Image (cartoon, rainbow, N blue to C red):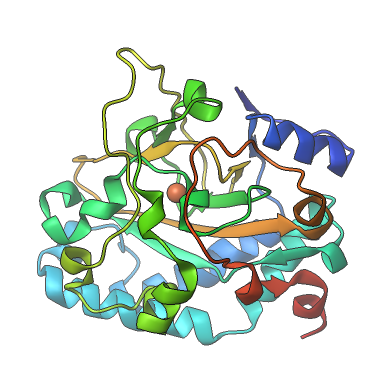
Amino acid sequence: MIRHNAPADNAELRQALYGSEVFLLAANAASRALGDTVRTLLHKHFGPDYRSLEHSADGDAFFGRMGLLRRELYLQPEPQRLIAELVSALGFDPARSACDPLRLRAILHEGERNPRAKAVYYPHRDTWYSHSQSLITCWIPLDDLPPEETFVFFPEQFTQVVPNNSEIFDYQRWVERDWNLKIGWQHKDDGLTAQYPELTGPLPEGAPRVGFSCSRDQILLFAGHHLHQTLPQSRGRNRFSLDFRLVQLDDHEAGRGAPNVDNRSTGSALPHYINCASALRA
Ligand SMILES: [Fe+2]
């Protein structure tokens, strides 16, 4: 299911993604530049050993520093330009591609024990967050990672309904409540009170899971419709990664994308995406 070479033709790549294939591609100049930009910020806030548990020993202090770092990242124009370069390098037409802002994720050692972080570990489809069925998710690790420190896909659920509460998510209501939620420097207790779409029942017994290892700055592309789950980890270090969402506008407008089997979220995140051609000009 996980391929390492993308078809040269971009339409073919998109079709394969909408058909459930996942691509783990070699790092390119743009993904390395994105990785370097964010590692520089991590060094600034946490020092060169930014994965060390000493930084997250005080959860509240760590959360506060990550909030500052995310804000600094969000206010830089360079990451959005690099995303547009990355997308162009993959053969997408920048004028017909739109991306949401870069997000930095931290998965902490034994983070699943923190009730505030529970939503991080929910099996979910990204499309349950009011995204297009044409959604392509791009994920970039900031370090070399073994399979225990990444996440898993549930490939059989690509075409199967799973019990979920995606109807609770309405994009417009969510951003109106607090724009900061969108960027990720939310209040530390939001994880306790905010409701996020999740799997609400068991998966079929023995449903296959597909995981992966990766090298830093590699580019993982998958349909945002894929059911996936971040793995809890307890290997003595924290894990940092980047991701952003991408929609090819012709596909969205023509209804080309992964099949919608169970997404009942409402509203649309697309109006807040940034056109890649304008990001390149900025
Ligand atoms: Fe996700």
- On the image, the x and y values in percent for residue 68 come to 34, 83
Quarter holding residue 42: bottom left
Question: Relative to 87, does residue 202 appear above or below in the rendering?
Answer: above
- On the image, the x and y values in percent for residue 44 come to 37, 79
Total marks shown come to 0
Quarter holding residue 182: bottom left
Judge whether residue 150 can be spotted in this image.
no
- On the image, the x and y values in percent for residue 121 come to 28, 46
Q: Residue furthest top?
A: 206
Q: Which residue is drawn at 71% across and 42% down?
A: 257
Q: Residue at x 54, y 35 (%)?
A: 261
Judge whether residue 233 can be spotted in this image.
yes
Horizontal side, residue 243 vs residue 223: left or right: left
Name the image quarter holding the C terminus. bottom right
Name the image quarter holding the N terminus. top right
Between 22 and 122, which is closer to the camera in this rendering? 122
Q: Residue at x 35, y 41 (%)?
A: 164
- On the image, the x and y values in percent for residue 174 come to 40, 73
Horizontal side, residue 149 vs residue 108: left or right: right
Q: Which residue is drawn at 30% across and 77% down?
A: 186
Question: Relative to 17, does residue 167 appear above or below in the rendering?
Answer: below
